[in-house]
């Protein structure tokens, strides 16, 4: 063969997929599924019996984990569905900028400044009020398929 060396550009995510396959018949309520290219939490699953020629079908009803929209899909139970990798990470809130971006402290001691305030009015007011009162807040960020959003808030006591 040849003696030349091959150099590959490294990708930060090491080529990791945003989803993994799982057989439709094994996906349960409260699991996750990709419907119409959106990561969804499954709220309802119903399985129909096999017809004269064919497969049992699974009817999934899911709620988009980022915008709350209801999506539906019907898949043969023996086929594979895409299931999103969903991760939750806690960050400590350092600051809120004028333009609505949060400054968060990561576990490694660095800062993460690319996250907007949530669109959920209740969560938004809790974060703003708690920060204004000088409370020590920890936000939980849910990330999946290249999107991130704040989904929860914890108060870990007043700042010292």
Image (tube, rainbow, N blue to C red):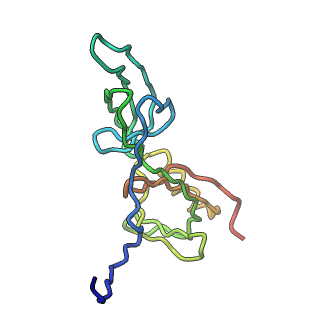
Nearest the eye: 70 or 2:
2
Q: How many marks?
A: 0
Q: Quadrant of residue 15?
A: bottom left
User: At 50% across and 29% down in the image, what residue appears?
Assistant: 29
Q: Is residue 47 left or right of residue 127?
A: left
Residue sitting farthest toward the front:
1
Residue 34 x/y as whole percent = 36, 41
Q: Residue at x 56, y 70 (%)?
A: 106
Residue 26 placed where, x, y %?
48, 31
Above-or-below relation of 31 to 121: above
Classify the position of the C terminus by image quarter: bottom right
Q: Position of residue 156 (x, y in %)?
A: 69, 58
Image height of 71 relative to 15, above or below: above
Screen quadrant of the N terminus: bottom left
Q: Residue at x 31, y 83 (%)?
A: 6
Between residues 84 and 76, which one lies in front from this camera angle? 76
Q: Is residue 128 left or right of residue 117?
A: right
Within the image, what quadrant is residue 93 found in?
A: bottom right
Residue drawn at x 57%, y 62% is 131
Is residue 30 depicted above or below 57 in this figure?
A: below
Could you say which is closer to the camera, residue 132 or residue 40? Answer: 40
The answer to which image quadrant residue 35 occupies is: top left
Figure check: 1 above or below 19: below
x then y, percent, for residue 89:
55, 58
């Amino acid at each position: 063969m040849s003696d030349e060396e091959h150099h590959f550009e490294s990708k930060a995510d090491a080529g990791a997929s945003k989803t993994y396959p799982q057989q439709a018949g094994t996906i349960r309520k409260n699991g996750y599924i990709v419907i119409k290219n959106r990561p969804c939490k499954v709220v309802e699953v119903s399985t129909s019996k096999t017809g004269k020629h064919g497969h049992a079908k699974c009817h999934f009803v899911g709620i988009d984990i980022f915008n709350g929209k209801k999506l539906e899909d019907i898949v043969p139970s023996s086929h594979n569905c895409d299931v999103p990798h969903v991760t939750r990470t806690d960050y400590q809130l350092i600051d809120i900028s004028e333009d609505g971006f949060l400054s968060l402290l990561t576990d490694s001691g660095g800062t993460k400044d690319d996250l907007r305030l949530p669109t959920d009015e209740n969560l938004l007011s809790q974060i703003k009020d708690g920060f204004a009162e000088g409370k020590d807040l920890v936000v939980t960020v849910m990330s999946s398929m290249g999107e991130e959003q704040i989904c929860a808030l914890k108060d870990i006591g007043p700042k010292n």
